[in-house]
Image (spheres, coloured by chain):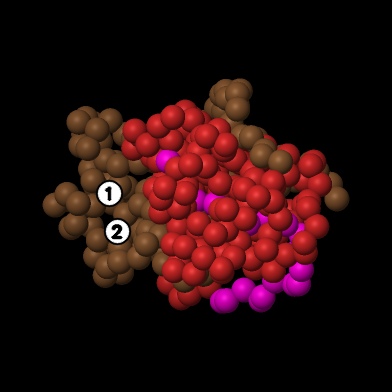
Chain colours: A brown, B red
Amino acid sequence: MDMDNEVLRAIRERRSIRKYRPEQIKDEELQAVLEAGTWAPSGMGYQNSYICAVQDKETCDKIRRLNGEVLGNPEADPYYGAPTIILVFSKSDWHNTVKDGSLVLGTMLLAASTIGLGGCWINRCEEVFASEGGKALLGKLKVPEGYEAVGSMSLGYPASPARAPRPRKEDYFRVIK
Amino acid sequence: MDMDNEVLRAIRERRSIRKYRPEQIKDEELQAVLEAGTWAPSGMGYQNSYICAVQDKETCDKIRRLNGEVLGNPEADPYYGAPTIILVFSKSDWHNTVKDGSLVLGTMLLAASTIGLGGCWINRCEEVFASEGGKALLGKLKVPEGYEAVGSMSLGYPASPARAPRPRKEDYFRVIK
């Protein structure tokens, strides 16, 4: 069995991308990323998450601003100018809300990097969708009743090569035999 | 750009494995899984997780029992007889504890499936390591001070083919253009 396959390499080589080209990604690229997200493991296999990709400029700009407000700087764009923003919501009344949503995001980040796209996990979505401005967006985003925001990602074509990775820390893992 | 590459296929084809052969996996297989885990995205790139693989039978059996106790059935083996148990801990005083730990586990589950191993996310670790029996294990597992359990996984050679996946739910994702 190959101990260094395409998938292990992709896992090692994925980087967070914080600078994007302005043009929108292709529909089939977005679909590949979203479909990958649906195959993330989920607690009991219940698929208790909902993924919403936003490409409409007005809505994207609102999300950028709301997220910046949580940062204390509404003019900042925490999505680094990425033309697509993907939000992940998971069922609230469920013991795996954050775990399930995180796996969906992690899976999409990896998938994106393997088809030439860049992505970066963006936090503060809980606060964004607890705010009045965020709540007003839930209908437009078609978020199902009883779901809450777990996180989000920026998505687009990388504008510059990613930074070299930091070395992995010492004693990241141990084996007890 | 290929919209159906090895990684996208691996993501779609990974299944949770709930039946294992008794023999231990090879060291290089375990190392490949653990190393993959260290490359999971982490908040701010801070690598605030710690991964502990347990193969020592006595310790594994203790963990099985403690986890079963949380279930209300100490004789149950929630790890399905898997010869390796991997635990993930993340820094407590940190806004991304559960998210970071989840991404480490998700990455290892995917990595394992690509080298012929089976894995399954196993919950209840928060309760296990809040119990007296769990606390007594922290030293042996060399868990750094200030870290808490996020989750775990069973790992081994699959004893039988995985179930066919459930179809993905309708409206798992939407695109707002």
Q: Is residue A94 left or right of residue A102?
A: left
Could you give the CA–CA distance between mark 1 and mark 2, rounded to whole angstroms? Answer: 7 Å
Q: Residue at x 65, y 50 (%)?
A: B58
Query: Which of the 4 quarters of the picture holds residue A65?
Result: top left
Q: Is residue A112 visible?
A: no
Is residue B42 depicted above or below A150 in this figure? above
Q: Which residues are magenta?
A: B148-167
Q: Residue at x 29, y 59 (%)?
A: A148
| Residue at the far left in the pictured view | A132
Q: Chain of mark 1?
A: A
User: Which SS class for mark 1?
Assistant: helix
- Residue type marked 2: Glu
Q: Which mark is residue A126?
A: 1
Q: Looking at this view, is A119 or A159 the one in front?
A: A119
Q: Is residue B164 visible?
A: yes
Q: Residue at x 44, y 69 (%)?
A: B72
- Residue type marked 1: Glu
Q: Which mark is residue B35?
A: none
